Amino acid sequence: MAYFWFKSFHLIGIVVWFAGLFYLVRLFVYHAEAEDKPEPARSILKEQYQLMEKRLYGIITTPGMVVTVTMAIALLITEPSLLKDIWLHLKLGLVALLVAYHFYCGWIMRQLATNKIMFTSQQFRGLNEVPTVLLLMIVLLAVFKNNLPVNTTIAVVGCFVLGMIIFFQLYALHRQRNTQQVVS
């Protein structure tokens, strides 16, 4: 019975963690775009985004990560035989990348707080898709386990990434046209 409790809270933690990661980098997009605003709007917006980023990271995103990882460890303690499966090792590797991404976002947040913006809003939009790709691969591994069709998975993930790139390019073009129309 403990296994199902741990699994339930593991899934809840994942939802919270990803919601936080998705929104955090979206705030980075807005933070970067605030640089283009005239004063006093720029200062007001940047101060508000810093506060929102800090609260989101500390109150939602990081606790979501802690619950996810803690419950995963509890699951492995209750079912240690899972450690023999290759799919789980691959999944844990992807989760390690996700944890690194989480802390990288924390580093970016601290850089933005000191007015060091290293990415454009468009680059932040691209960065926001990293957890999406990791989520896709993690879920596929968790569902298919050792029966994951590798070639199909590579094709699906590749098409997904290509689709995102095309979408971002079209969106950037759309925004550029709208900006030019407003200026005209």
Image (cartoon, rainbow, N blue to C red):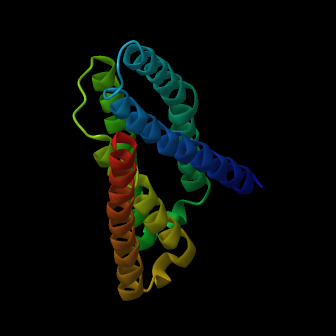
Q: Position of residue 35 (x, y in %)?
A: 31, 26
**Residue at the image position 49 percent from the left and 19 percent from the top:** 48
Any part of residue 100 in sight: no
**Residue at the image position 57 percent from the left and 38 percent from the top:** 64
Is 94 or 70 nearer to us in this picture?
Answer: 94
Rendering quarter of residue 41: top left
Q: Position of residue 124 (x, y in %)?
A: 33, 44
**Residue at the image position 39 percent from the left and 40 percent from the top:** 102
Any part of residue 94 in sight: yes
Is 81 or 33 nearer to us in this picture?
Answer: 33
Position above or below: 149 against 59: below
Q: Position of residue 106 (x, y in %)?
A: 37, 30
Position above or below: 87 against 50: below
Position above or below: 80 against 175: below
Q: Quadrant of the N terminus?
A: bottom right
Q: Position of residue 146 (x, y in %)?
A: 47, 80
Q: Quadrant of the C terminus?
A: top left
Rendering quarter of residue 101: top left
13 with respect to 95 (left or right): right
Furthest-front residue in view?
Answer: 184
Position above or below: 22 against 162: above
**Residue at the image position 41 percent from the left and 62 percent from the top:** 133
Rendering quarter of residue 76: bottom right
